[in-house]
Amino acid sequence: MNGSAPHTTAPATPAGTGTGTGPAGPTDVDYLKSLQRRRPFGVWFKDKGWRHLVGIIVTVFAVFPLLYVLSAALNSTGTLVGSNALFSKIDFGNFTALFDMPSRPFARWFLNTMVVGGVTSAATVFLGAMAAYAFSRMRFTGRRFGLLSLLLLQMFPQLLAVVAIFLLLSGISEVIPALGLGSQLGLIMVYLGGALGVNTYLMYGFFNTVPQSLDEAAKIDGASHTQIFFGIILRLVTPILAVVGLLSFIAISGEFVIASVVLTDPDSQTLAVGLYSFVAQQRSENWGVFAAGAVISAIPVMALFLFLQRYIVSGLTAGSVKG
């Protein structure tokens, strides 16, 4: 009647749906989160829960054998059956016995493995990188045939040539004993011959991802192929070099068949061949000591992986942001 606006009452706001401007009371985001927390278990499991279940199953499947071997290594009963109850007994008797056997020099085997694995991995990376650079950057007669030959050779595993390797090294022993049967240098040469093919082809594909404009710019500045290779290319392909070196070291550390044929002297054997002697005889099996040696032999591989991981990750991250 007096011209003023009619008085109206604002509708009540449901609890928990405030705008959050007041001193107290949840915000809209908190309300939505509370609704999410109230989802039925079946809906949550269908959306995300099954992924957690699969992850737990895969983790248990992968970790259980490692725990079983570690439990057997820490149980000095000497049998795997006694280790069914994981970590029921913990002692270091197997590790002590591992280094107290004069007829089975574990420390010597460990050193031999590091030498053979380290030299072979380094030589594989270096020679494979040079061959991959030549196939990727140079054009010469027989280039296509060489690439096809590397690919076809991978169809035949190195295990098929064990007899030929034995006869070849046996003949070389009569001329050059340092490269013949029973020598670690001969074993390294055999490993290099079998690993260069697949590693060269693997690095060749990675080298092709490096722009050739970098090579052309370096050539304009007067750089040679050697300067381009060591100064530019190797710095850009560090991830593949780390991967090839790691895979080569892992494969060589666990290789048994060829090493057992070539290395006839117990003092020159590697860990894979030497540890087999603990369980080779049926009536004198010592699985506890064997498990202790397996645990120690896994340490260098883990250390090398952790060391090279930063190069692999940094290389992949750097490559993802380059335009």
Image (cartoon, helix red, strand yellow):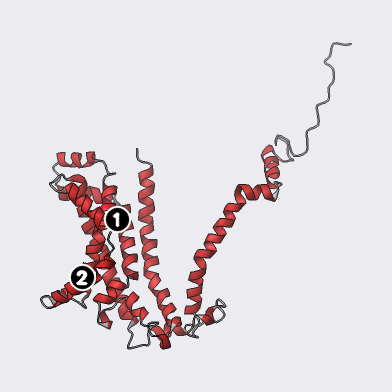
39 relative position to 68: left or right = right
Q: Nearer the viewer, residue 238 or 75?
A: 75
Residue at x 32% of width, y 88% of height: 103
Label 1 SS: helix
| Residue 23 pos. (x, y %) | 73, 39
As drawn, the residue found furthest toward the left would be 175
Q: Quadrant of the C terminus?
A: top left
Please state the horizontal and vertical placement of residue 72, each as a whole percent of the image. Answer: 49, 78
The image's mark for residue 164 is 2
Q: Which percent across, then down, holds residue 140?
A: 13, 46
Which amino acid is tagged 1?
A: Leu
What residue lies at 23% left-to-right and 74% top-to-bottom?
184
Q: Nearer the viewer, residue 71 or 195?
A: 195
Q: Residues within 10 Å of mark 2 (few under 14, many from 20)?
A: few
**Which residue is tagged 1?**
241
The residue at 85%/20% (across/down) is 7
| Quarter of the figure with residue 110 | bottom left
If the image is split into quadrants, where does the N terminus sit? Answer: top right
> How many residues crowd mark 1 within 10 Å: few (<14), some (14–19), many (20+)?
many
Q: Is residue 210 above or below residue 6?
A: below
